[in-house]
Image (cartoon, rainbow, N blue to C red):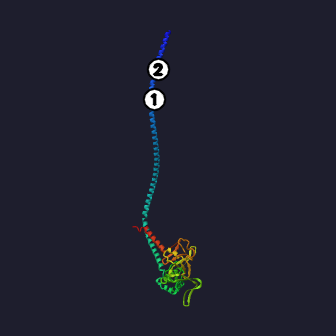
Amino acid sequence: MAKATNNSMRLGRLVRLALLAGLAIILIAIIAFLFNEDSSLRKELADRNAELASAHQNISALQKSIMLDERTINEKDADIANLTGALEDTHSRLNNTQIQLQYTISELNQTREELENKSLSLEQAKAQFSDLKTQIADFQTTLQESIIWFKDNSRLSPNLGYFAPYVRSNCVQEGQLNLACVTYMMEKRLGFHYISETTDQLHSLDEAVSRGGGDCKDYALFLRAVLNSVNDTTPSVDLLSWEPGYGKFIVYQSGDQEYYYNGDNVTLPKLGSINPEAFCYVTGYNAGVFDGHCIVALGEHAILDESDLPGLDGAKAFEPQDGGFKGTIGNDYHLCENGEMSCGTEPGDILVVMSDDDLYEFHDGEWRSYGTYSGRLTDFLAQIDIATGANSG
């Protein structure tokens, strides 16, 4: 019983050992299988990790490429937005230009209609210009005739040619031409007296004599003409004037008869060294109305245009109605200058100068003459020719 039990126990142990050995073999096989599977899985994992790393690199490269593409797309979007705004602005301006163009076309059409309607008016205007040109030319002719008038009356006319020798015979004594005597002979020989006038009309020398005299302008022009005519043959005589004083100034003496003024001699320059000019100056001025008087100045230089007028400064002056000395231009008389707008309101201001060739008048701060107006009319006629196309080929 004891042995059977021991055998049974041994058999049980052997069975357990066998089972254990089988289990160990199975475990070893499982471990080997698992080891092999683990190696295979590790290799596959390494491959997968390598593939994953490569995929990560590709993804990173793609992300960079996508970022660059997005940046480019954003820039392009901004460019598109700017271009869209510029296009809209251009489109707006084109619309405005189209509206303005349509308005301009409408105005042009209206202007064309007006021009067509006014074509006849233009022809009428040209005709009026032509008529105006004729009138201006006629007026210019009148101005030229006025200039010629002063030239013709700067010396005694042939009808009065006898008077210059008469003056030399009766008024030249000891190499002096007595100006007061000339005035006396005008009255005695020609019947020339002072005639008051309400107008500023100028009379020719022949007219003044035929009507028996004239006002201060006529006296001044006549005395100037006498001096110019006497100068043609007797330039070397001194001019003799006078001024109020205590002496006895002889005007004319014949036998027991003598005519004189209470005054003293005033010797003036030689006749051949001066250019006699008639001038008019202000004697009184009130509320826009002035009174004036005309006498004769003995200038050193001839006056040919406005630029010569200042040459009268320093010229001696005398009264043509009695031959009396009246003073000096620059001291006793003021020759108005261009730009002096108020000149002509003070006594002694010279407003008119009558030379051998022209009449000069100070007006609106400027010296003007017939020659000045004639020149301006010539320029105006040229402008009319240009305006009317008269000179066009």
Residue type (three-letter) at the residue carrying disc 2:
Ala
Regarding mark 2 in the picture, which secondary structure is present there? helix
Instruction: Classify 10 Å Cα crowding around label 1: few (below 14), some (14-19), many (20 and above).
Output: few
Asked if residue 97 is positioned above or below residue 70 in the image, the reply reads below
When asked about the image quadrant of residue 253, the answer is: bottom right
Image coordinates of residue 6 in percent, x first then y, are 49, 11
Q: Which of 61 and 284 lies nearest the eye of the viewer?
A: 61
From the top left corner, tell me how far across and down residue 117 is, in percent: 43, 63
Residue drawn at 47 percent across, 17 percent down: 17
Would residue 283 appear left or right of 160 to someone viewing this image? right
User: Furthest residue to the top?
Assistant: 1
Residue that numbered label 1 is attached to: 42
Q: Residue furthest right?
A: 246
Picture layout, residue 128 above or below residue 161? above
Instruction: Check disc 1 and report its element: helix, strand or loop.
Output: helix
* Residue 329 % position (x, y): 55, 77
Residue 378 seen in the current view: yes
- Most extreme residue toward the left, as rendered? 393
Marks 1,2: beta carbons within 8 A:
no
Q: Quadrant of the C terminus?
A: bottom left
Q: Please determine whether, in this image, residue 78 is positioned above or below residue 16.
A: below
Sequence-wise, the earlier of marks 1 and 2 is 2
Residue 384 horizontal/vertical position (percent):
44, 69
Residue on which the image places disc 2: 24
Query: Image quadrant of residue 326?
Result: bottom right
Tag count: 2
Three-letter amino acid code at disc 1?
A: Arg
Return the mark for residue 134. Answer: none
Q: CA distance from mark 1 to mark 2?
A: 26 Å
What residue is shown at x 46% (from left), y 18% (from top)?
Answer: 21
